[in-house]
């Protein structure tokens, strides 16, 4: 008997470098958003619920656009990522604007997810193979493992500037280290500048695996989040800017619980929209996917 699986879509961030709410920028031939293709692929892979983490002020926009198109095809839940959704002993400054991070976004969904789940960014196109491999892992997941669906860094770059990637290093097929970096192509290799400025830059080959935040979890992750959210924000040192990030939480929670994070490589084509100049390449990439037969021209027809 197949398990219930949830896709958790992180959609609360405004695309500052893109210049707006890029999650609802039309990219398909009939006005489809990236999220449409994500839900379509997840449905085909066996997911039967989607949870959107959004800003409360964007609720009507999401419901009247993507919500209307998919609510008859999959169970849909909306949760709001709010600064106030923290324990009483955490005092976030009123002047803070940016969200509290991807781990906090997952924390905000703790009351509506009781099954195995995968997370994605709303503004990334992951491709069908990524969802199939996530679903396969989650259907058979034990409490001893999480997973990351990893992409080749060379397939995730843009010609329009640096992008942030979690560079993955493995040991026996499991995550050994993940370094958050700004990356760009440089003379046939990929130049990585760690976000931790104390660490020197380094180069990796184009087939180096990176995390695009397609993680697979069991609900026990929420226990870790609830037990550690206060300690993170009360010790971060910068409540105006520090972000609680899921790659760090995944690694730390697995270590604390005696788990491993399996790294599963995918051949899916990754398409992103970090900069406005990426939009036309993204649209072209989707047209190529349609021409290959993976999607219908009118996705939901």
Image: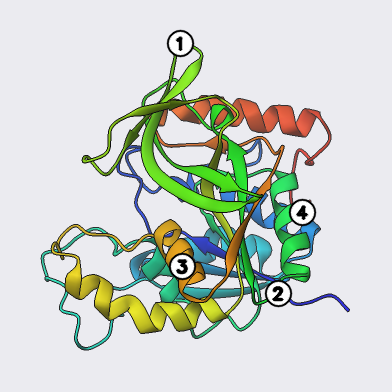
Q: Secondary structure at mark 1?
A: loop
Residue contact between numbered discs 3 and 1, judged by CB atoms under 8 Å: no
Which one is in front, 178 or 150?
Answer: 178
- Binning the other alpha carbons within 10 Å of mark 2 as few (below 14), some (14 to 19) or many (20 upward) gives few
Identify the residue position indicated by label 1 in the image. 187
Marks 3/2 in contact by CB < 8 Å: the verdict is no
- Using a 10 Å C-alpha cutoff, classify the residue at mark 4 as few (fewer than 14 neighbours), some (14 to 19) or many (20 or more): some
Among numbered discs 3 and 2, the one appearing first in the sequence = 3
- Residue 109, percent across and down? 48, 77
Which residue is denoted by mark 4 in the rendering? 132
> What residue is at 39 percent from the left and 83 percent from the top?
226
Quarter of the image for the N terminus: give it. bottom right
Residues 163 and 251: in front is: 251
Discs 3/4, front: 4
Q: Earlier in the sequence, mark 1 or mark 4?
A: 4
Which of pointers 2 and 4 indicates the residue nearer the eye?
2
Is residue 21 shown above or below 230?
above
Left/right placement of residue 223 relative to residue 197 reads right
Q: Residue at x 49, y 86 (%)?
A: 111
For the image, the number of numbered tags is 4
Crowd class of label 3 (few under 14; some 14 to 19; many from 20; radius 10 Å): many
Q: Of callouts 2 and 1, which one flags the residue occurring earlier in the amino acid sequence? A: 2
* Label 3 residue SS: strand
Q: Farthest residue toward the right?
A: 1
Distance Cα–Cα, label 3 vs label 4: 22 Å
Which label sits on residue 142? 2
**Label located before the other in sequence (3 or 4):** 3
| Residue under pointer 3 | 53
Toward which corner of the image does residue 245 lie, by quadrant? bottom left
């Amino acid at each position: 008997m197949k398990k219930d699986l949830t896709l958790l879509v992180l959609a609360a961030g405004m695309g500052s470098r893109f210049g707006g709410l890029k999650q609802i920028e039309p990219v398909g031939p009939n006005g489809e958003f990236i999220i449409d293709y994500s839900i379509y692929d997840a449905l085909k892979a066996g997911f039967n619920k989607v949870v959107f983490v959004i800003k409360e002020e964007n609720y009507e926009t999401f419901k009247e656009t993507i919500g209307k198109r998919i609510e008859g095809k999959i169970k849909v839940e909306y949760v709001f990522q709010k600064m106030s959704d923290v324990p009483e002993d955490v005092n976030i400054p009123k002047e803070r604007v940016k969200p509290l991070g991807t781990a906090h976004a997952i924390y905000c969904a703790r009351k509506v997810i009781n099954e195995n789940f995968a997370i994605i960014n709303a503004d990334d196109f992951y491709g069908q193979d990524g969802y199939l491999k996530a679903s396969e892992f989650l259907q058979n997941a034990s409490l001893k493992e999480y997973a990351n669906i990893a992409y080749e860094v060379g397939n995730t770059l843009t010609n329009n500037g640096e992008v942030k990637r979690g560079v993955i290093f493995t040991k026996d097929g499991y995550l050994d280290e993940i370094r958050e970096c700004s990356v760009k192509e440089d003379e046939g290799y990929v130049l990585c500048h760690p976000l931790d400025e104390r660490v020197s830059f380094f180069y990796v080959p184009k087939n180096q695996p990176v995390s695009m935040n397609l993680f697979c979890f069991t609900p026990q992750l929420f226990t870790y989040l609830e037990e550690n959210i206060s300690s993170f924000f009360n010790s971060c040192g910068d409540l105006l800017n520090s972000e609680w990030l899921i790659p760090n939480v995944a690694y730390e929670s697995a270590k604390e619980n005696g788990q491993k994070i399996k790294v599963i490589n995918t051949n899916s084509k990754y398409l992103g929209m970090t900069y406005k100049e990426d939009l036309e390449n993204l649209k072209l990439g989707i047209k190529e996917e349609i021409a290959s037969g993976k999607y219908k021209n009118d996705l939901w027809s």
